[in-house]
Amino acid sequence: MTDDVLVVHGGTPLQGQIRVRGAKNLVSKAMVAALLGDSPSRLYDVPRIRDVEVVRGLLELHGVRVTDGDEDGELVFDPANVESASTDEINVHAGSSRIPILFCGPLLHRLGHAFIPDLGGCHIGPRPIDFHMQALREFGAVVEKRPEGLHLTAPNGLHGTKFSLPYPSVGATEQVLLTAVMADGVTELRNAAVEPEIIDLICVLQKMGAIIKVHTDRVIEIQGVPKLGGYRHRPIPDRIEAASWAAAALATRGGVEVLGAQQADMMTFLNVFRSVGGAYEVTDARPPRLGSAGQEGGIRFWHPGGELKSVALETDVHPGFMTDWQQPLVVALTQAQGLSIVHETVYEQRLGYTEALNSMGANIQVYRDCLGGTPCRFGRRNFKHSAVIAGPSKLHAADLVIPDLRAGFSHLIAALAAEGTSRVYGVDLINRGYEDFEAKLASLGAHVERP
């Protein structure tokens, strides 16, 4: 634990420019999609994060040759020799990521069987795989639960189906897409997730030869094809990381330009950011001209001075306010005048991180009631999933232990905004989703160090 700590000297506004690469929530899924091709795929702008390492390891265990391309951040996947991996080898990755569940469909298509170990990921509330297993059974998979994990076979092949999700789950939607593209017949998925990362995954699969129609009212229709090729794809930028740096700029009364951030995918966040009192400017990309280099576009976020304003917000599936945006922004809301209300409707245990903020001087009360009108899956199930933040609060340094990825970055923002020196433990967890975050902090003028 002593090696996994960051010492943060707070009180300095972040100032400067950083760049975000491909979205964590797309890149890992596109890597899995490469399993379906009968020729190599190339993925660009891949961030150097832990989740990418995990998926790369799982692909290599199954015979996919993964190499670095010529361009920085480029990965090349050659699936010519896909093979079974031993249970023991796969279990090395058990608990380190939730991505293995998405290997089911591609492995059933390529090998006729699949093994999925115990799933990991962040502890922000139970994320059952019932939707995944139910969908796979609809396609014709046979699922056998064993002590070491799940064994799946498809004795009669995989066939198109009509399936409606009880909730527009991102992971279950990805599962259906990755399975349906080569299933025999047509699949109709209702109440599907339509996040930008889902649409980008559909773009990847379409490049490979898939036939996918996105209809209105969350309906996706997939016509199965007998084979798929490789792809070349540059993913959408990571809108979660972009918003995290925006919140850090606001909480520390600084200014951060996030190169690569795209307005279209962040419109809901930008509306709330402006409502709180933050300022931003969208900078368009400039192509290179004779004698001068081009410039990548992005969004510059800054605290314009004066008081921040309290807001009421509710998380929701896209196009609502993203649950992963909530935690970093709440740190900034501790500095807003008045009472802010946050109703978390996506993950029932996502407000646990507020205890650490209170230990630093914040005034946050959490409630079991639904403090908002957005339909909520667990309002009557006794979970504390609404928060009232009274501000502004003067934050002071503390020793913090990171519980999960997004809460971890929020704790880091709080330590940067607080007066004094904090020690943030478990900080390596942030590497799961934030590339080179320590180097980026240093470039923004933050005073952080490993002890």
Image (spheres, grey):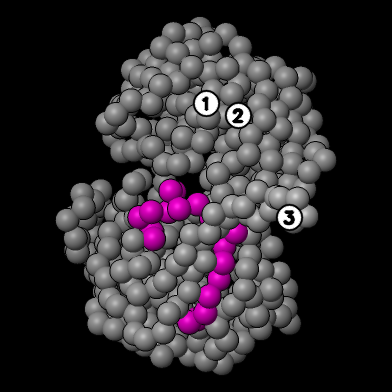
- Is disc 1 in contact with disc 2, using a CB cutoff of under 8 Å? yes
Disc 3 to disc 2, C-alpha distance: 35 Å
| Residue 360 visible (yes or no) | yes
In the displayed structure, 334 sits above or below 264; it is below
Q: Which residues are magenta?
A: 252-270
Check disc 2 and give the amino acid type: Ala
Q: Amino acid at mark 1?
A: Leu
At mark 3, the secondary structure is loop
The quarter in which the N terminus is drawn is bottom right
The mark that comes first in sequence, 3 or 2, is 2
The residue at which mark 2 appears reads as 33
The reply to whether the magenta stretch includes residue 260 is yes
Residue named by callout 1 = 178
Q: Earlier in the sequence, mark 1 or mark 2?
A: 2
Q: Which mark is residue 43?
A: none
- Please name the residue that numbered disc 3 is placed on: 293
Q: Residue visible at 63% across and 80% down?
A: 446
- Please tell me whether mark 1 sits on a helix, a strand or a loop: helix
Q: Is residue 131 magenta?
A: no
